[in-house]
Image (cartoon, grey):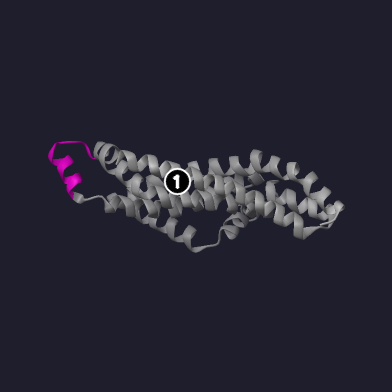
Amino acid sequence: MDARVWGIVVDSFTKLLIPGITVTIPLTLISFALGLILAIVVALVRVAKVPVASQIAWFYIWVFRGTPLLVQLFVIFFGLPSIGITIPALPSAVIAFSLNVGAYAAETLRGAILAVPKGQLEAGLAANMPYVTIMRRIILPQAFRSAFPPLFNSFIALVKDTSLAANITVVEMFMTAQRIVAIYYEPLVLYIEVGLIYLVFCTLLGWLQDYCEKKLNEHF
């Protein structure tokens, strides 16, 4: 690596890190939080087999797990304006990521809820506890414990998936890398650099996941 290329790498680091911290990470956090809320509702609807709502929930999961995330982004950002619905790039990304996360997380949570022994639900009902209270205080805490690893894996995957938002003009870390490449014409080193930054983010999150899992194991 000659002095010019090394200088480009050093100069680009801050330019890549700033959108990574100010756009990529917030986009991930907001999208995952909204997706998780949606997932809880959808999972509970499916477990309870609520008429009509359960079928709607199944259809939602079927669509968003069965189509590429990039297509979902394009439909929301480029497709909806054709029917008079225009959503800015960043909110479009949040909507697409949240709906996608919600579909996958809903099935993860549904499986975790169904894994809790049915006797606990029956015992709560026998004690005249309301169904909502049983789910909130008995079933869901146990379900979240078993669902935590796959849910956190989805969160880490979302950090990388946010790079797709560059395709709908969201100026996150990967789009910033593309713009720098267009200036300096050094795609190999710059794309490796942005990849390493993603790797650092995901490694730190992996350590956080290990720590949280250990804490959860201490309480269960």
Direction from residue 169 to residue 97 in the image, left or right: left
The x, y position of residue 185, in whole percent, is 83, 58
Q: Is residue 52 visible?
A: no
The x, y position of residue 109, in whole percent, is 36, 50
Q: Quadrant of residue 17?
A: top right
Report the magenta stretch's main SS.
helix
Residue lying farthest to the right in this orientation? 4
- Magenta-colored stretch includes residue 177: no
Residue depicted at 39% across the width and 53% down the height: 108
Direction from residue 39 to residue 182 in the image, left or right: right
Per the rendered image, the range of residues in magenta is 119-131
Direction from residue 176 to residue 93 in the image, left or right: left
Depicted 93 relative to depicted 132: above or below: below
The x, y position of residue 136, in whole percent, is 30, 38
Dot 1 amino acid type: Asp
Q: Which image quarter is the C terminus in?
A: top left
Residue lying farthest to the left in this orientation? 126
> Circle 1 is placed at which residue position?
210
In this view, the residue in front, 67 or 151, is 151
